[in-house]
Image (cartoon, rainbow, N blue to C red):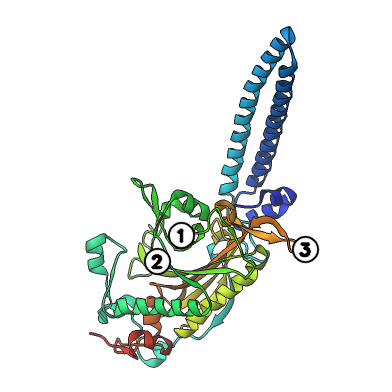
């Protein structure tokens, strides 16, 4: 969640952030009012409690009628203190509720607007001219079926729409891409993690994903949530802890299956494996100091682009507009690969700087060090995340490296993960 003290000090920058997000500015005033109400209620409680203690001391020394009067006053004060404490708790709960639903403060320079208002930062590589090569490109599903790699029909039979089987070379291809990403992460000194895919409500809420409840699978009997990214489990990994970041950021690479309802996507990308309910993903997750989060964000983006370069994919990097950031992100960069069959770019990776937003919700702090070397106070850490590989990468790989006969060229960097295969041949 946001830093309420910072909002009180500079409310206008939060109003500007809300305007950029195309969100309700009046929530800033609601937060200010709720904070003032909590402060007043807490002051009233503490004043009455102090008076109660003072009167209690007088009772011990008093005698006779005076003592009886003081006892009556203390009894009334006890009732007043109880009521004031309840009022203070209610005011704190109301502030927490409003604060929890308030989105992160965006970074300076983030484009204003909605989904279509992103800014393209750069474009790498050139899409192939298939017409010059003399053939019409097939889409990834047609290619996957030719290769015996994807079976949507039986996926739907077994589990319903937007489910699939990867088989044969399709299964090997996904594992190869994921393993290549994991090797790169290990070289960059990330700690590999196989993470839980079911998490408690407080963990889901701590990351800010519970706000997107329509897209989340909930197991009511167990009150557990299926994650849409290992970011959720990795964010909860250090909940309620004080971290030592003196040696630099803590970096984890989480490999997990992910689940999304894809609510609101009716009719979108119904063909193939672009938008599905279950997929695998390798996610980078970082804990660092708040001061280093912007630099770390650039590092995560560079690692994502390194992977795209290894797979020889044309892509562009976009600065996502404020209204498309979600609750937790202060800034998000997407890498979108060219998809020939759609004649457009589609998201393959996303990296977000969530600053201290998630850490405040999950109570994750670091111990500061004073100028004299002694231990200082604690402060919230920053958290960041970034995709290194997912099932969707198969889409871009098949389509961009296809040949006229339905075979697919294997990028050189990926070959050793496929036993040296240079070409995927139709069955």
Work out how far the residue at label 2 is from the one at label 1, CA to CA, in angstroms.
Answer: 10 Å
Task: Describe the element under mark 1 as helix, strand or loop.
Answer: helix
Task: Give SS at disc 3.
Answer: loop
In the image, taking residue 132 as reference, residue 92 lies left or right, namely: right
Tag in front: 3 or 1: 3
Q: Residue 178 carries which label?
A: none
**Pointer 3 or 1: first along the chain:** 1
Above or below for 353 versus 166: above
Residue 254 location in percent, x, y?
45, 68
Vertical comparison of 186 with 207: above or below: below
Q: Determine which residue is flagged by label 1.
A: 233
Are the two marked residues, 2 and 1, in contact with CB atoms closer than 8 angstroms? yes
Residue indicated by mark 2:
256
Local crowd at mark 1 within 10 Å, few (<14), some, or many (≥20)?
many
Farthest residue in the top direction? 65
The image quarter in which residue 255 lies = bottom left
The mark nearer the N terminus, 2 or 1, is 1
- In the rendering, at what x and y percent does residue 244 appear? 61, 63
Helix, strand or loop at disc 2?
A: strand
Residue 324 x/y as whole percent: 54, 61
Between marks 3 and 2, how big is the CA–CA gap?
44 Å
Determine the residue positioned at 63% across, 45% down.
Answer: 27
Q: Can residue 276 be seen in this view?
A: no
Q: Residues within 10 Å of mark 3 (few under 14, many from 20)?
A: few
Q: Name the residue under label 3.
A: 372
């Amino acid at each position: 969640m946001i830093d309420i003290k910072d909002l009180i000090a500079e409310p206008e920058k939060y109003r500007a952030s809300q305007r950029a997000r195309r969100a309700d500015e009046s929530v800033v005033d609601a937060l200010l009012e709720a904070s003032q109400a909590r402060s007043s209620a807490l002051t009233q409680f503490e004043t009455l409690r102090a008076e109660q203690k003072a009167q209690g001391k007088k009772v011990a020394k008093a005698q006779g009628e005076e003592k009886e009067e003081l006892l009556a006053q203390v009894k009334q004060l006890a009732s007043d203190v109880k009521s004031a404490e309840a009022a203070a708790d209610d005011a704190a709960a109301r502030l927490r509720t409003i604060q929890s639903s308030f989105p992160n403060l965006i970074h300076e320079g983030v484009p204003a607007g909605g989904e279509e208002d992103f800014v393209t930062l750069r474009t790498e590589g050139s899409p192939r001219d298939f017409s010059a090569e003399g053939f019409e490109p097939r889409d990834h599903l047609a290619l996957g079926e030719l290769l015996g790699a994807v079976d949507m029909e039986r996926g739907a039979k077994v589990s319903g729409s937007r489910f699939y089987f990867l088989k044969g070379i399709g299964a090997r291809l996904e594992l190869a891409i994921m393993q290549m990403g994991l090797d790169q992460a290990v070289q960059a000194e990330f700690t590999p993690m196989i993470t839980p895919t079911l998490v408690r409500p407080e963990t889901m809420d701590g990351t800010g994903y519970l706000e997107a409840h329509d897209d989340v699978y909930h197991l009511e009997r167990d009150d557990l949530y299926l994650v849409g990214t290992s970011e959720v489990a990795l964010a909860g990994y250090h909940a309620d802890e004080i971290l030592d970041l003196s040696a630099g950021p803590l970096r984890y690479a989480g490999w997990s299956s992910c689940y999304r309802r894809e609510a609101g996507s009716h009719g979108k990308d119904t063909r193939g494996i672009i938008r599905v309910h279950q997929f695998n993903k390798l996610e980078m997750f970082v804990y660092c100091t708040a001061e280093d989060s912007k630099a770390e964000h650039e590092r995560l983006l560079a690692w994502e682009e390194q992977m795209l370069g290894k797979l020889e994919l044309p892509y562009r990097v976009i600065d996502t507009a404020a209204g498309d950031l979600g609750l937790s992100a202060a800034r998000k960069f997407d890498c979108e690969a060219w998809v020939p069959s759609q004649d457009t770019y589609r998201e393959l990776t996303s990296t977000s700087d969530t600053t201290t937003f998630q850490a405040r919700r999950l109570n994750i702090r670091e111990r500061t060090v004073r100028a004299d070397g002694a231990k200082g106070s604690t402060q919230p850490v920053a958290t960041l995340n970034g995709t290194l590989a997912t099932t969707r990468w198969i889409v871009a790989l098949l389509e961009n490296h296809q040949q006229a006969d339905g075979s697919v060229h294997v990028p050189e960097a990926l070959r050793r993960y496929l036993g040296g295969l240079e070409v995927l041949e139709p069955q």
